[in-house]
């Protein structure tokens, strides 16, 4: 019997609130399946299972705050599943009346993980018509994707009557704060789901607790204060424990931007590249070139990573900051990197990140150019050992081969952990970053 425990979703996390279970007892889960949503001081984060098995028992109810490491659920051995689940056969029943005999037989239950069921629902695929290729006929992700391509089925025009409303955890919590009946709100999100914006925009909603006197702004203020406190504690720890050093250079972007304009001239507007994609890809590839800056500090030594999971600092509204990681950023082409960046920023600001994005970053980039800052001396995000600060693109006088011209430039700063490296490594990183941006066709 294994356990699924409250995971640590960041270096500064000591406890979290279970918002929602996405599985129930008896469900088969596999490593990597999303099984729960946990709220931290910064965001609601989707948490995946760490091993294969069967959900034996849910130990913590939604809405409960528990410490990191607290058991949330018990998992049974997956090998025991066939024994615990009766084989579905045609039962022997007494002779039924003619009306009952004419009724169609009940379909056998489909065996699939919650994630696969979610994918099938999103794709409009009827799971009962999908043959399972997994053990014991379990329907897998590949089976759903094949059915989506080969036998696309129309989704029902009208969902079955149900009191359950599709909504995000933040929307439900906001509705509770306002005393609003969420079932009375028309959702504008994917598949008609109710979003926080829908809740805030509703002015004719039914009040579930009309006599309750709850200040509307206080919960949001409290959450902002909790986030600021969490950020302050982590950054204070970083400056207290990590001996920072800084190296800075100015990079000529004329070649990179000229190449980008040529590429964009052949593309529709929706598929055009932006400078941030070039800067992030070059930052990730430079980290691969200088591995001593790509990793984490643990037990008084550097643990260099064999992959580049690029953290991206994302500002939240009305205030706050998270740094989710784009996994394997150095291996992604520029178009895919842009898609991942848009996706992670959108989910960060809507409060729906994943555990891997919050815990597996190996180096972080903060780009404040869009806010007008020309340079950034960032604070390292522990347990990482380096952070790259990028300012805005500025036209500056530039001397080259004895000639003076005006060039678009960016100021890049490497904040390094002196316990792991020194200024020489930081300078090599910036040199590698510069070289990559002078050959953008290799990004």
Image (cartoon, rainbow, N blue to C red):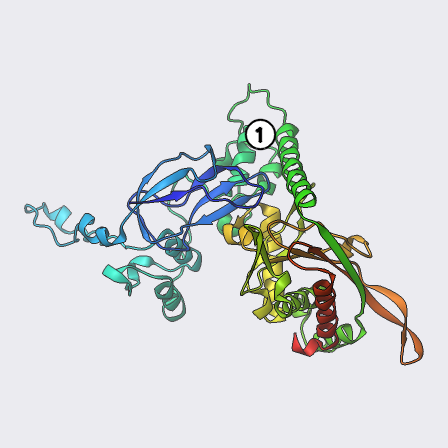
Q: How many marks?
A: 1
Residue 366: image location, x then y, percent: 70, 55
- Compared with residue 341, is residue 359 higher up or lower down, i.e. above or below? above
**Quarter that holds the N terminus:** top left
Indicate left or right for 62 with 298 as reference.
Answer: left
Residue depicted at 33% across the width and 54% down the height? 52
Visible residue check, residue 156: no
Task: Name the one closer to the observer, 112 or 8.
Answer: 8
Q: Is residue 212 visible?
A: yes
Residue 170 relative to residue 370: left or right: left
Instruction: Give percent across and percent down for residue 317.
Output: 68, 43
Residue 345 picture quarter: bottom right
Q: Residue furthest left?
A: 94
Q: Quadrant of residue 22?
A: top left
Residue 337 drawn at (x, y percent): 61, 65
Residue highlighted by disc 1: 178
Q: Nearer the viewer, residue 176 or 32?
A: 32
Dot 1 alpha-carbon crowd within 10 angstroms: few under 14, some 14 to 19, many 20 or more: many
Q: Residue furthest bottom?
A: 401
Q: Position of residue 382 (x, y in %)?
A: 62, 49
- Residue at 78 percent across and 52 percent down: it is 371
Which image quarter holds the C terminus? bottom right
Q: Nearer the viewer, residue 251 or 152?
A: 251
Query: In the visual, does 415 lie left or right of 143?
Result: right
Label 1, secondary structure: give it.
helix
Q: Is 203 left, or right, of 440 in this rendering?
A: left
């Amino acid at each position: 019997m294994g356990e699924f425990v409250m995971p640590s979703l960041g270096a500064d996390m000591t406890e979290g609130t279970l918002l929602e279970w996405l599985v129930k007892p008896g469900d088969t889960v596999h490593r990597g399946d999303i099984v729960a949503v946990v709220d931290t001081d910064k965001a609601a984060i989707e948490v995946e299972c760490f091993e294969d098995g069967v959900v034996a028992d849910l130990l913590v109810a939604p809405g409960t705050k528990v410490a990191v490491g607290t058991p949330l659920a018990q998992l049974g051995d997956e090998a025991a599943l066939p024994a615990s689940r009766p084989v579905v056969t045609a039962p022997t029943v007494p002779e039924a009346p003619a009306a009952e005999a004419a009724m169609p037989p009940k379909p056998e239950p489909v065996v699939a993980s919650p994630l696969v069921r979610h994918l099938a629902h999103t794709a409009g695929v009827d799971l009962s018509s999908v043959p399972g290729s997994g053990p014991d006929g379990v329907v897998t992700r590949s089976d759903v994707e094949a059915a989506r391509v080969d036998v696309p089925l129309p989704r029902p025009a009208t969902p079955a009557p149900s009191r359950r409303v599709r909504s995000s955890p933040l929307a439900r919590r906001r509705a509770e704060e306002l005393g609003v009946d969420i079932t009375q709100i028309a959702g504008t999100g994917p598949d008609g789901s109710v979003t926080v914006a829908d809740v805030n925009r509703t002015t004719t909603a039914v009040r579930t607790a009309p006599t309750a006197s709850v200040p509307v702004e206080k919960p949001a203020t409290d959450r902002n204060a909790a986030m600021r406190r969490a950020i302050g504690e982590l950054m204070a720890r970083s400056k207290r424990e990590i001996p920072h050093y800084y190296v800075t250079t100015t990079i000529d972007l004329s070649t990179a931007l000229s190449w980008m304009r040529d590429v964009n001239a052949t593309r529709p507007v929706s598929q055009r590249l932006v400078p941030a994609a070039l800067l992030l890809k070059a930052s990730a590839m430079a980290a691969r070139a200088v591995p001593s800056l790509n990793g984490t500090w643990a037990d008084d030594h550097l643990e260099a990573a064999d992959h580049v999971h690029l953290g991206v600092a994302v500002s939240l509204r009305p205030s706050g900051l998270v740094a989710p990681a784009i996994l394997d950023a150095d291996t992604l082409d520029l178009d895919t990197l842009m898609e991942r960046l848009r996706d992670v920023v959108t989910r960060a600001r809507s409060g729906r990140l994943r555990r891997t994005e919050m815990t597996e970053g190996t180096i972080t980039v903060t780009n404040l150019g869009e806010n007008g800052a020309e340079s950034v001396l960032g604070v390292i995000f522990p347990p990482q050992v380096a952070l790259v600060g990028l300012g805005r693109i500025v036209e500056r006088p530039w001397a080259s081969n004895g000639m003076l011209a005006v060039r678009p430039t960016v100021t890049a700063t490497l904040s390094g952990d002196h316990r792991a490296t020194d200024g020489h490594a930081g300078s090599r990183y910036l040199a590698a970053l510069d070289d990559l941006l002078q050959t953008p066709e290799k990004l």
